[in-house]
């Protein structure tokens, strides 16, 4: 049995080890797959953020053009060159302020303008329709650029004159440079251009990440030249590097720099693991459940082995217990038959009394076994009644004194003069008989047994103390187990079945009480019973 149990332990350990290794392998590979998915998603988010920036950039251009084509800055007039020809209509746009007025025709027909007007969802103004058309007609957008640039310069003519006074041969790029220095000019870039772009792009990128339920912290790398990609690993992620020309707060990016943007995640593993938390928790619960199942199986096997050992001990003890009265009665009967004991009245009575005593012992042994079987199957029904404690204890003491084969001294003290308890008289007397009997059997001669009774709250306490050999500490918690006996090797100086204390515990707990034991080797043992005083 030990060899088989060892094999079970080895196989169980290998199975658990295999399960743990498999779970670790699965978790690592699942992390790699989720990490690759994370890298792909953040790159998609960056592309969408770029699209958002482009859309936002062109939306800002629309707003600026519409504003500058609208009154009071601009007045749009329809001037028909040929009265009967309603198709060739020219629009004349007047930019007016205190310095100058510019008249400029734009060649766009009415049907064309209406075509682009229909692309706008709401009832668009002429300025809005012209703005929409400029995004599809490059020449029209170029006209707007030149016209508005000229207007900006004309509006700041005094500054331009000062700018060109020192050098009358100023080239065109210098004029544009001057134009870009004018606040609100179509060529104006903010001094903190990269920071402004970074804030706008970071906002768009964060929004796109949140749509994908990604909340990992990130940094944006913005440079003026292409940088080589870094090597991705489990603790680092980055997006591809994208060209960025959609500078905010300006109308056109004619002279704007080109930036290269990359999103960097230095600790993405926490976000990846967070996305796996549900699966990881289920995996760990599965491992724990598997451990529990194997533990339960092994524990059951060990308990079955203990039960088998206890049954073997029980059979051996029962064999000794049964053989003794049978052998004694056999000798007594042979004496009556072979030694003419029937003619000797005194000898006949002695042999018969011996046989009777052995039958009583045999009947007691069988009764114990039947009682154990009964309470194991929950067949014992207690008949509780008002019982005189002094009479019950004294009756048990007298019974044990008559049975004793050694000199005994049994004392009983009712400290609180408790008179009545609500118990089953028969079974509770058997409880006392078992405890007193054990106290006598496991004590040296003379056996000194002290029985005490007192009150503790609403409970009555019984204690049975002896001066016996005591119980080893590692067996105290097992003495109430069925069939358990403290091992003494192959020597059986004290007869027993290992059922008595198991029966005692069952009856006490059936009364709603509990039983405890205190013991020291060679100092004796003390069993303490606590049961409710009344039925209520």
Image (tube, grey):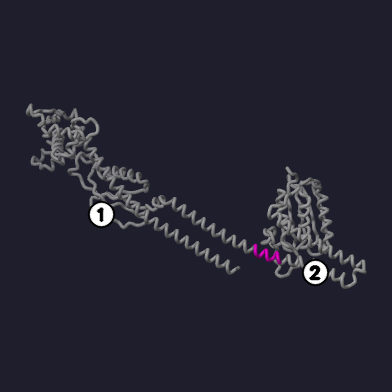
Q: Which quarter of the picture shows residue 94?
A: top left
247 versus 104 height, above or below:
below
- Horizontally, residue 168 falls left or right of residue 303, namely left
79 versus 418 height, above or below:
above
Residue appearing at x 75%, y 50% in the figure: 461
Can you give x and y, in whole percent of width and height, for residue 416 in the image?
79, 47
Viewer-side residue, 141 vs 119: 119
Q: Which stretch appears magenta?
A: 307-315
Quadrant occupied by the C terminus: top right
| Residue that extends furthest to the top in the rendered view of this protein | 83
Q: Which quarter of the picture shows residue 164?
A: top left
Can you give x and y, in whole percent of width and height, for residue 169 in the image?
8, 41
Residue 118, numbered label? none
Closer to viewer: mark 2 or mark 1: 2
Residue 309 is a magenta residue? yes
Residue appearing at x 70%, y 52% in the figure: 379
- For mark 1, what is the residue? 227
- For mark 2, what is the residue? 327
């Amino acid at each position: 049995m030990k060899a088989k149990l060892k094999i079970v332990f080895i196989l169980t350990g290998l199975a658990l080890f295999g399960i743990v290794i498999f779970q670790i392998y699965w978790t690592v590979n699942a992390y790699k797959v989720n990490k690759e998915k994370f890298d792909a998603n953040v790159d998609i988010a960056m592309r969408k953020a770029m699209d958002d920036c482009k859309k936002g950039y062109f939306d800002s251009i629309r707003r600026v053009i519409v504003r500058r084509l609208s009154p009071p800055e601009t007045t749009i007039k329809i001037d028909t060159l040929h009265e009967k020809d309603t198709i060739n209509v020219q629009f004349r746009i007047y930019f007016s302020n205190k310095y100058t007025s510019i008249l400029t025709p734009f060649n766009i027909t009415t049907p064309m303008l209406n075509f682009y007007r229909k692309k706008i969802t709401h009832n668009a103004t002429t300025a809005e329709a012209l703005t929409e058309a400029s995004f599809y007609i490059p020449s029209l957008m170029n006209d707007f650029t030149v016209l508005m640039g000229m207007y900006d310069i004309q509006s700041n003519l005094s500054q331009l004159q000062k700018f060109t006074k020192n050098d009358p041969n100023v080239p065109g790029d210098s004029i544009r440079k001057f134009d870009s220095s004018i606040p609100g000019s179509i060529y104006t870039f903010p001094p903190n251009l990269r920071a402004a772009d970074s804030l706008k792009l970071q906002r768009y990128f964060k929004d796109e990440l949140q749509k994908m339920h990604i909340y990992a912290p990130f940094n944006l790398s913005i440079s003026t030249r292409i940088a080589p990609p870094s090597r991705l690993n489990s603790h680092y992620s980055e997006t591809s590097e994208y060209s960025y020309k959609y500078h905010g707060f300006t109308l056109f990016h004619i002279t704007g720099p080109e930036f290269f943007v990359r999103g960097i995640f230095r600790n993405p593993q926490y976000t990846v693991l967070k996305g796996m938390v549900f699966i990881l928790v289920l995996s760990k619960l599965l491992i724990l459940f598997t451990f529990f199942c194997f533990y339960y199986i092994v524990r059951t096997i060990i308990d079955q082995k203990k039960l088998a050992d206890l049954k073997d001990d029980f059979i051996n003890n029962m064999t000794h217990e049964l053989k003794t009265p049978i052998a004694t009665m056999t000798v007594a009967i042979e004496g009556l038959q072979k030694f003419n004991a029937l003619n000797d009245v005194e000898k006949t009575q002695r042999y018969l009394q011996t046989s009777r005593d052995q039958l009583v012992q045999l009947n007691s042994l069988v009764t114990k076994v039947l009682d154990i079987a009964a309470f194991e199957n929950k067949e014992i029904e207690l008949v509780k009644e008002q019982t005189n404690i002094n009479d019950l204890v004294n009756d048990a003491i007298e019974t044990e004194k008559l049975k004793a084969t050694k000199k005994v001294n049994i004392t009983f003290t009712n400290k609180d003069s408790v008179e009545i308890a609500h118990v089953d008289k028969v079974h509770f007397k058997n409880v006392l008989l078992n405890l007193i009997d054990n106290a006598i059997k496991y004590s040296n001669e003379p056996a000194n047994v002290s029985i005490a009774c007192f009150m503790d709250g609403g409970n009555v306490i019984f204690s049975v103390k002896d001066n016996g050999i005591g119980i080893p500490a590692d067996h105290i918690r097992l003495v109430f187990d069925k069939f358990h006996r403290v091992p003494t090797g192959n020597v059986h100086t004290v007869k027993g079945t290992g059922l008595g204390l198991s029966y005692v515990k069952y009856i006490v707990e059936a009364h709603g009480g509990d039983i405890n034991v205190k013991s020291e080797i060679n100092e004796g043992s003390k069993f303490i019973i606590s049961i409710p005083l009344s039925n209520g």
